[in-house]
Amino acid sequence: MRSTSDTTLAESVTRLSDLYTSQRIGLVHAQAHASHLAAKCEFFLAADAPKVALALDECAARTRAFGRLATLETIRVIDFGAGVGATSVGFLAWLTSMHGRAPQDAPKRVRVEIHAIELGVAAAKVLERSVAAAASHCGFDVTLTVTADDFHSTTALDADLILSQTALNELLDGSEHAAETVALVHRWASAAPMLLIEPALKTTTRALMQLRDALLLRGGMQVVAPCLHQAQCPMLAREGDWCHEARRIKHTPRVEALNRIVGRRDERALFSYLATMPNSCAQEFPLFELAPTAVRLCTDKLGSRGKTERLVCRADGEMRMMRLLDREVRTGNQAFLDTPRGDIVSVEPMPINDRITPEAAVGRLSS
């Protein structure tokens, strides 16, 4: 329900966004302010929930460890740093969508047990209302348990899915915090399929990429997405590189209106994420095999005189700047230009010098 004028709410959205971008030192205390809670309830809840579905769709396309969630009669979910409920609501929306695609083995009655970890009392109250509203529309039997613990106090990790959105970046500030957080998140990653979503900022995204590499070094788990490989992240080798998503979604009318007021010209969903599964899951539900010629398009088209370039992350762990000359565009390689950022394509044959030839076949593998 709308309780704040668009102009006032837009100011709160801007201030809270600034806290996450350039004034992070005051984030922990300031974000509990009533105006910031309003921004989370009336803007970020609707803006952030769709990111969960976008990421989970990708995960389900990579392994049945995620896709099988739609076939379970009871689904146990842990939502760390649940806030006002964007992540749990986004999960329920994704699960509803999966059932709407009518998988043959989907159960007719589904129970979803959400264990939300949230320290903020005011946020927890909104969380309960948000999940209740989502549950009334999804048709599932949803139970919500809210625990006011910090992450380290949560020892029971009996779950089918672990979620966390915009919560870990505050724990990755400084080497000591980073080391503690790696150990914490490794425990999550070793227990169940896991999805972490963070802001699409250079600092937070590179911290998430460093966390990814540290988890792989500890072992016991596999990266599901967005990476196509288990090698160390090639983008970390260069300070200026950072990998994040920019996906087109249909915002609610109010989110669109507020975006116009605050002057946001890019209305895509912007976020970074990391999805993993334990080795025990990988043995039962391995990653679907990708062709060695598969690459993820990490940027939009980078046009320059006479050519189009795009940064790609390859299935072999190499990061390359591939290019297609304007005079060599053909029907068979047109997908290099037309495929949206973030999608996976195959390039046959894989160019040795990163130049896609007129004879190359570029095919879209994901959408």
Image: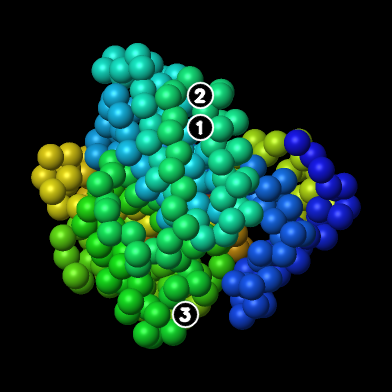
State how far apart marks 2 and 1 are (Cα): 7 Å
Q: Badge 2 is on which residue?
A: 138
Nearer to me, 231 or 124: 124
Task: Judge from the rendering whether residue 326 lies leftward or rightward of residue 319; answer left or right.
Answer: right
The spot of residue 158 in percent (x, y) is 25, 47
The spot of residue 89 in percent (x, y) is 53, 38
Task: Judge from the rendering whether residue 367 lies leftward or rightward of residue 109; answer left or right.
Answer: right
Count residues near mark 3 (Cα–Cα under 10 Å), then give few for <14, some for 14-19, many for 20+: some
Q: Secondary structure at mark 2?
A: helix
State how far apart marks 3 and 1 are (Cα): 32 Å
The numbered dot on residue 93 is 1
Count residues near mark 1 (Cα–Cα under 10 Å), then give few for <14, some for 14-19, many for 20+: many
The numbered dot on residue 200 is none
The spot of residue 11 in percent (x, y) is 82, 60
Q: Secondary structure at mark 3?
A: loop
Tell me if residue 223 comes above or below residue 128 in the rendering. below
Nearer the observer, disc 2 or disc 1?
2
Task: Judge from the rendering whether residue 236 lies leftward or rightward of residue 318; answer left or right.
Answer: right
**Outermost residue toward the bottom?**
175
So how many labels did they put on this image? 3
> Is there a contact, CB below 8 Å, between mark 2 and mark 1?
yes
Image quadrant of residue 20? bottom right
